[in-house]
Image (cartoon, helix red, strand yellow):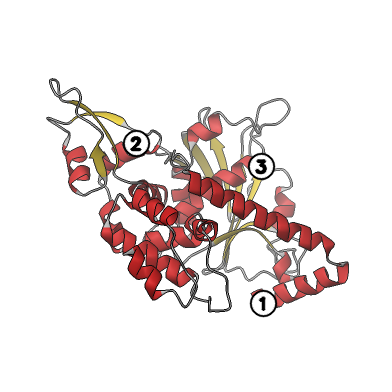
Amino acid sequence: LVDAFNSHNSKKKINASKKIAQYIMDFTSGHLGLIRWMLNGVDNYFSYRDTSCKVTTAKEIMSYFTSSDFMEHIKAHRGAHLYNFNVIEGNFIDELLLKDELPVNSHNPDKAVNALVEAGILSYVDDEGSKFGESRARFLSPAARLLSFFHRSKKPLKDGFTLQELVREALSRINSKALTHNMGRSKDGTRLLERVWQMEFYTAIYSCLPDEMHISSDVGRIFATDGAVDFYISEPQWAIELLIDGIDLKRHHERFQDGGRYSPIPIKSYILLDIRETRIVQKSYPKTWHITPNADFTVFNVLEGTDTFNIFTRRGYPRSPVVRLLAQESEALKYEMSTIKKKHISYCEEGEEIREAKKRQDRRDIV
């Protein structure tokens, strides 16, 4: 397959070396469909190349394999639907994502483990304890781990949900353990800093959104206003603002009114999330949720006007898969960092007028 790929792309100067071929084999565990899919991704990513270009280096191709473009390409593989797990399978996958291997009984395995092995997602590492059926299970390949992580970390809501339904679901996906052990607190240690909540909410909201909807943070300057709303979901034009203990609640509310800081931003619906850890609500405002967490952040009491209700968190999804970096991946990351550093040096050497001209052009391009 690799030889055929190199022959087909010789005019584009795209060449998958032996190192790249070995990496693809390791990443896919020899799955032919995934190998073809990865090579197609390389072909598409470097399709701009012609005879005037130098031959692609292994570092260039590996930099693609560590990019978000490659992640999206892998998620689009036709076998991705196999990673829609039931509850029991999902719990096992969640635990395995945090480790390299898990002990199982290969002679009499759980139905969930057996189904995952038959689907080509897991494999048995060995069966040294055959007398007792003791073995260990792990992901069949890094690709299987990656796809499993995507499907466990992002479960979008069905079409037609409202902003309030989105926030309710996001609250239920808050990682209570991450907040409990977070050191980003005020001097007296009584409350978490707003930045901590922003990061956790961004992760939770992102996991709720379908692929066609996108969340951005600190949006405002692109619309020629000094204000920057915490979160903006561009497709339905929703805005979400966070604040702590009601500090400057009135001023936050006024930003969304006519003539306010956020009035230039196209907003069809908005909500203020007031996280209350140390203060009692004195006055409520419309389109505002006053949220009081319990001690371990597993229950959130929400006050909306005169209505109150509780939202319970579910077991948080793992933040990132524990995957050992291969030598080629490390080289690719170093290559990416050196490229970014060169761009930064080039940027610093440019004159102020050139930088301002580029910023204006970028704004025009975005608009």
Relative placement, left or right, of 61 versus 223 is left
Badge 2 vs badge 1, beta-carbon distance below 8 Å: no
Mark 2 surroundings: few (<14), some (14-19) or many (≥20) residues within 10 A: some
The image quadrant where one finds the C terminus is bottom right
Residue 222, horizontal then vertical, whole percent: 70, 69
| Between marks 1 and 3 in the image, the one whose residue lies nearer the viewer | 1
Instruction: Tell me the crowding category of disc 1: few under 14, some 14 to 19, or many 20 or more residues within 10 angstroms, Cα based.
Output: few
Query: As rendered, which of 35 and 134 lies closer to the eye?
Result: 35
Numbered disc 1: secondary structure: helix
Q: Which residue is drawn at 36% across and 46% down?
A: 145
User: Residue placed at 80% from the left, 74% from the top?
Assistant: 357
Q: Which amino acid, mark 2? A: Leu
- Residue 64: x and y in percent read 50, 60
- Residue type at mark 3: give it: Glu
**Mark in front: 2 vs 3:** 2
- Residue behind mark 3: 194
Q: Is residue 334 visible?
A: yes
Q: Which of marks 2 and 3 is nearer the N terminus?
A: 2
Using the numbered discs, state the Cα–Cα distance from disc 1 to disc 3 in whole angstroms: 32 Å
Q: Residue 96 carries which label?
A: 2
Q: Name the residue under label 1.
A: 365
Q: Residue at x 60, y 54 (%)?
A: 336
Q: Residue furthest right?
A: 352
Task: Classify mark 2: helix, strand or loop.
Answer: helix
**Horizontal relation, residue 131 to residue 212: left or right:** left
